[in-house]
Amino acid sequence: MTKKKFQFPINYILIGFIVILLIFLRQMDQRVTVLENQIVTVEKVDVVKKEEKAHKISPEVPPPTMKGKIAIIIDDFGYRNDDVSDGFLALNAKLTYAIIPGHEHSKSFGEMAVKKGFEVIVHMPLENLANKGGEDSFVLTTSMKSETIQERVRTALNQIPMAIGMNNHQGSKASADQHVMSNVARVIKERKLFFVDSRTTAETVAESTMEVFNVPTTRRNVFLDNVDDEGKILAQLIELVEKSDKWGSAVGIGHVKPNTLKILKEHIPILQRKGYQFEFVSNMLH
């Protein structure tokens, strides 16, 4: 009897191959699903990060660009003690107040000004061409001897001891006189103070004389209120600002007047916000 040889049916082999292929494909599908989930997760994290960057609670505000430095001297304190002088003491800026010696409120205003954080200088009366008079016991004239000039300057400084410098009150005649200004310079140098040339005349020798004596000095660039009108004062303030832009710094002189106070009270804060820096005149010397 002949034995029959066993043959594995080919269809079984085909079915087995299909089963293995399906298992392989299923595993690949699972791997693809896991990879897709990872990609989606990364994209979500990236979106969150982008949203966090796009929606800041407190956006950064760049500081204002610093512009020109401005020094303002206000002349003629000492005459009055009223709402106008009080208004200048309430201004929020580094300002320099020039006090005329020999008046009722000269010393007391100087004390109040320093207490409020302002800088004080002596507003020294000098002879003018118009012979206007005033402050007869302090005014410096071209006919005086050197000793008299120096004595008057020392007396003025002693009366206002908180003063750290001086500028001239009027002086269209005396500030153009080498004799007068040399004697002023000697006392200023002796006291280690500074002098600001108000430039009440184009012929002034005040600044140049101080330089010869090695006294720290500077000059007035703009008068704010020669015309006591709000519009004109504002125009002069704008000119001062423009000069500070052009030169880096500029010095203006105004007076204890209601209109001057009004313009400065309104426009100093605006200029400060724009980046202009108000400085004591003592920081503008050469």
Image (cartoon, rainbow, N blue to C red):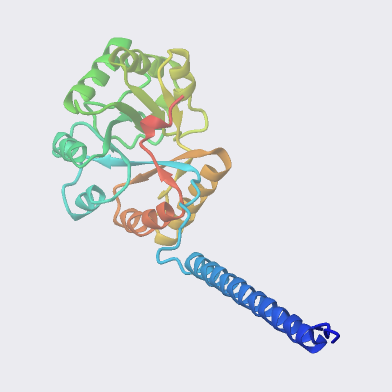
Task: Determine whether 269 is above or below 112 in the image.
Answer: below
Quarter where residue 154 is shown: top left
Residue farthest along the front direction in this orientation = 1
Quarter where residue 73 is shown: top left
Task: Determine whether 237 is above or below 138 in the image.
Answer: below
Q: Is residue 190 left or right of residue 236?
A: left
Q: Is residue 22 left or right of residue 154?
A: right
Q: Residue at x 23, y 47 (%)?
A: 89
Q: Residue at x 79, y 83 (%)?
A: 8
Residue 212 lies, in percent from the top left, at 47, 13
Residue 4 lies, in percent from the top left, at 83, 86
Quarter where residue 131 is shown: top left
Task: Determine whether 117 is above or below 91 in the image.
Answer: above
Residue 142 lies, in percent from the top left, at 38, 20
Q: How many marks?
A: 0
Residue 161 lies, in percent from the top left, at 19, 25
Task: Determine whether 76 is above or below 128 in the image.
Answer: below
Relative to the observer, which residue lies in front, 118 or 14?
A: 14
Q: Is residue 79 left or right of residue 227?
A: left
Quarter of the figure with the N terminus: bottom right
Q: Is residue 125 left or right of residue 234?
A: left
Relative to the observer, which residue lies in front, 149 or 24?
A: 24
Relative to the observer, which residue lies in front, 57 or 176?
A: 57
Q: Residue at x 35, y 30 (%)?
A: 167
Q: Is residue 43 visible?
A: yes
Q: Is residue 170 visible?
A: no
